[in-house]
């Protein structure tokens, strides 16, 4: 481990000077954000889920399909699993996804955030099993690490809260934030995913958080019927789902973003490939 590496990332040195200038020209994630929305036709996906779930006790869902597609994207396009911190580029060591879990589908129910690390060679089956186990564990727990820490910090006077937050930002800038903290904080992740469709809401563009180093914020909308133009230039009604991405544009170029998000779009519409382990994954640290 280099002296300049972080607990969650390896410093990238073999990237162009032009790319290295971007964090100095655009120091924050907020001013570097680009917004992309993709509409997936999911009639085939829903039919696939019905077929694959026949006889299964733990059912695959459209959320599992989206998560598995995201893991596959980061595995096959490791440039998208980078982040900028302290105006330097780092390759994230693991594929980490964070998402919100509602303990009960009731008005007064509490929410918490789950962060999970996924094997780049995962299939949708292993991902669904991991997510289901994590969600069950979270729902049975009265509180989480993030909730405990937030309750502790916000019980302090405001000037101490400001001092703690400022100190943490300084440590993070210099790569000195402890690994045990980064491991638990949901904002230090490859992507933060909000499944608004699960609460019958449509997609929005999620704000980028300056806290943490997540380079992707993804929102999954509800499944709905909309008029679309088919391949014969005819208007027909299709079952669709919108997925929006708020992305830190500094981590890679537009071509790579477009190709990778196109792959996610295709996998959501045709998830068969998610049943198989990927082959010949690229080395994520070749630019280190």
Image (cartoon, grey):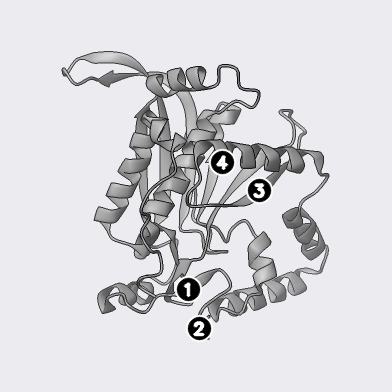
Specify the label residue 158 is tagged with: none
Q: Nearer the viewer, residue 43 or 130?
A: 130
Q: Residues within 10 Å of mark 3 (few under 14, many from 20)?
A: many
Specify the label residue 2 is tagged with: 2
Instruction: Indicate whether 42 appears above or below 82.
Output: above
Q: Are marks 1 and 2 in contact (CB under 8 Å)?
A: yes
Instruction: Indicate whether 28 appears above or below 142.
Output: below
Between disc 2 and disc 4, whose residue precedes?
2
Residue 125 shows up from this direction: yes
Q: Which residue is mark 1?
A: 10
- Residue 105 picture location, percent across and down: 71, 28
Q: Nearer the viewer, residue 210 or 239?
A: 239
Q: Nearer the viewer, residue 22 or 63?
A: 63
Q: Which residue is mark 3?
A: 114
Q: Secondary structure at mark 3?
A: strand
Instruction: Indicate whether 48 appears above or below 120.
Output: above
Q: Residues within 10 Å of mark 4 (few under 14, many from 20)?
A: many
Q: Residues within 10 Å of mark 1 (few under 14, many from 20)?
A: many
- Residue 31 picture location, percent across and down: 40, 63
Q: Nearer the viewer, residue 261 or 248?
A: 261
Q: Secondary structure at mark 4?
A: helix
When asked about the image quadrant of residue 272, the answer is top left
Q: Are marks 4 and 1 in contact (CB under 8 Å)?
A: no
Specify the label residue 127 is tagged with: 4
């Amino acid at each position: 481990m280099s002296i300049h590496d972080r607990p969650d990332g390896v410093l990238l040195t073999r990237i162009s000077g032009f790319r290295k200038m971007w964090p100095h020209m655009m120091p924050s994630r907020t001013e570097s954000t680009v917004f992309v929305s993709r509409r997936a036709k999911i009639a085939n996906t829903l039919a696939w889920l019905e077929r694959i779930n026949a006889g299964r006790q733990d059912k695959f869902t459209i959320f599992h399909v989206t998560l598995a597609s995201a893991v596959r994207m980061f595995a096959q396009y490791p440039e998208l699993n980078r982040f900028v911190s302290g105006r330097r580029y780092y390759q994230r060591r693991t594929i980490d996804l964070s998402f919100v879990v509602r303990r009960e589908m009731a008005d007064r129910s509490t929410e918490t955030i789950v962060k999970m690390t996924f094997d780049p060679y995962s299939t949708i089956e292993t991902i669904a099993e991991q997510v289901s186990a994590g969600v069950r564990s979270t729902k049975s727990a009265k509180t989480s690490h993030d909730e405990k820490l937030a309750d502790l910090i916000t019980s302090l006077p405001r000037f101490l809260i400001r001092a703690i937050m400022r100190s943490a930002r300084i440590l993070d800038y210099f790569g000195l934030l402890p690994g045990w903290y980064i491991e638990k904080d949901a904002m230090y992740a490859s992507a933060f995913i909000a499944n608004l469709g699960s609460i019958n809401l449509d997609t929005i563009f999620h704000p980028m958080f300056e806290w943490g180093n997540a380079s992707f914020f993804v929102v999954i909308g509800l499944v709905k019927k909309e008029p679309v133009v088919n391949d014969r230039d005819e208007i027909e009604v299709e079952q669709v789902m919108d997925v929006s991405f708020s992305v830190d544009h500094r981590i890679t170029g537009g071509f790579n973003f477009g190709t990778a998000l196109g792959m996610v779009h295709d996998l959501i519409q045709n998830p068969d490939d998610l049943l198989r382990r990927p082959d010949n994954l690229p080395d994520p640290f070749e630019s280190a």
